Amino acid sequence: MKLTGSSEFLHELWPSVKKTLNYVFLKWDTDDDFVDSEQHVTYDIELYGPNPLTTILILGAVKAAAEMALYLGEEHSASLYQKIFEKSFNQVDKILGNQSYYEQKLDDVNKYKYQHGQGCLSDINCLVNN
């Protein structure tokens, strides 16, 4: 709606947005904090454990969905998505922050191929808000 000016387009896409988020919540969250799991990414790999790349992308999607739901008059969905956003947002610094940037947290970064572990991906803004 914000980019196209078309609420018709938003109404058309909304069922797919909700379906996609439901998949994320069911398959990509292992412990109800919305910060970690096994997630396939556009590098054609899986990221494991708490990681900033997928977490920040999910946070953006959930925040956008909360605003879309509110616009569409779906207060229950808007409230649910806002609560999920706040819960995850509040966990990011605690789980992923190292006082300088957000990093992937794995006990053994070499257990899986292509994990970044301690380090910062250039795709995202990983600076911790201090």
Image: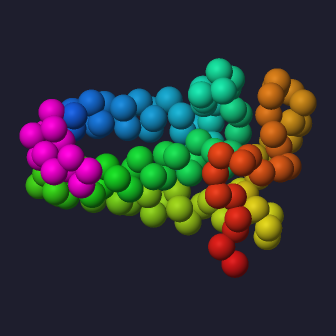
Residue 107 visible within the image = yes
User: The magenta stretch spans which residues?
Assistant: 1-12
Q: As drawn, is 91 to the left or to the right of 117? A: left
Q: Residue furthest top?
A: 44
Would you say residue 33 is visible in this rendering? no
x and y percentages locating residue 4 in the rendered image: 21, 46
Residue located 55% across and 65% down the image? 90
**Residue sitting nearer the eye, 107 or 110:** 110
Q: Is residue 5 left or right of residue 90?
A: left
Drawn side of residue 128 relative to residue 56, left or right: right
At 69% from the left edge and 58% from the top edge, which residue is drawn? 126
Q: Is residue 2 magenta?
A: yes
Asked if residue 128 is positioned above or below residue 112 in the image, the reply reads below
Q: Residue furthest bottom?
A: 130
Q: Is residue 35 above or below residue 111?
A: below
Tell me if residue 116 is in the magenta stretch. Answer: no
Check the image and report above or below for 58 versus 40.
below
Q: Residue 42: percent from the left, percent from the top?
A: 59, 28
Residue positioned most to the front: 4
